[in-house]
Image: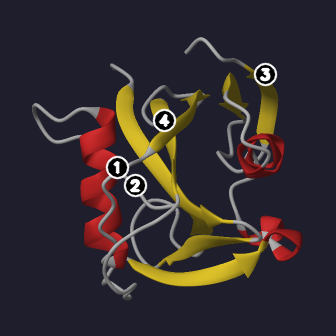
Amino acid sequence: MAKKITTLCIVHQHPRILLGMKKRGFGAGKWNGFGGKLLEGETPEQAAKRELQEEAGIIVSDLERMGVIDFIWPDGEGDQEVHIFKAGNYASKIRESEEMLPLWFHVDEIPFESMWPDDKYWLPLFLEGKKFSGQCFFDESGVKIKKIFIEENENF
């Protein structure tokens, strides 16, 4: 099965970031950025902007591409190439959607224990404004990381 291309966007206004509690579907019960699959003909940046508006009511004109991570699952069914973006300024009022409950966190109080286990490896680079790429291999349970490789990368 072919790898899905998806997006993830985090609003970062130092010293705080906006995360969403996923209320349904893949990743339900976890704090995460906003994002999802590309629609036909969309670029990753277009999809990230659309998903941010759909999931949190946020309209942005500019996104900064921070990284790309390949997520590999043992059965190959959930394999994803995730393009990670940073949003700073936005227009509109943040709102809860059927899918996500947005909440601001101070960068010193990020709820890593309630997030995907890979976030603690790349989110510090994101917060420092560093570009990165990598691969994350999940174990058979799909909960724990079997192997992860994340590095700074200005050339992705």
SS at circle 1: helix
Residue ID for mark 1? 48
Dot 4 alpha-carbon crowd within 10 angstroms: few under 14, some 14 to 19, many 20 or more: many
Q: Earlier in the sequence, mark 3 or mark 1?
A: 1
SS at circle 3: strand
Residue ID for mark 3? 151
Residue flagged by tag 3: what amino acid is it? Answer: Glu
The percent coordinates of residue 153 (x first, y second) are 70, 18
Q: Mark 1 against mark 2, which lies toward the viewer? A: 1
Dot 2 alpha-carbon crowd within 10 angstroms: few under 14, some 14 to 19, many 20 or more: many
| In this view, 143 is above or below 148 | below
Dot 3 alpha-carbon crowd within 10 angstroms: few under 14, some 14 to 19, many 20 or more: some
Q: Residue at left 30%, top 78%?
A: 57
Residue ID for mark 4? 82
Q: Residue at left 51%, top 71%?
A: 28
Q: Are marks 4 and 3 in contact (CB under 8 Å)?
A: no
Disc 4 to disc 3, C-alpha distance? 15 Å
Q: Earlier in the sequence, mark 2 or mark 4?
A: 2
* Residue 37 appears in view: no
Work out which quarter of the rendered image holds the C terminus and state it: top right
Disc ID at residue 124: none
Q: Are marks 1 and 2 in contact (CB under 8 Å)?
A: yes
The percent coordinates of residue 145 (x first, y second) are 78, 39
Q: Earlier in the sequence, mark 4 or mark 3?
A: 4
Q: Earlier in the sequence, mark 1 or mark 2?
A: 2
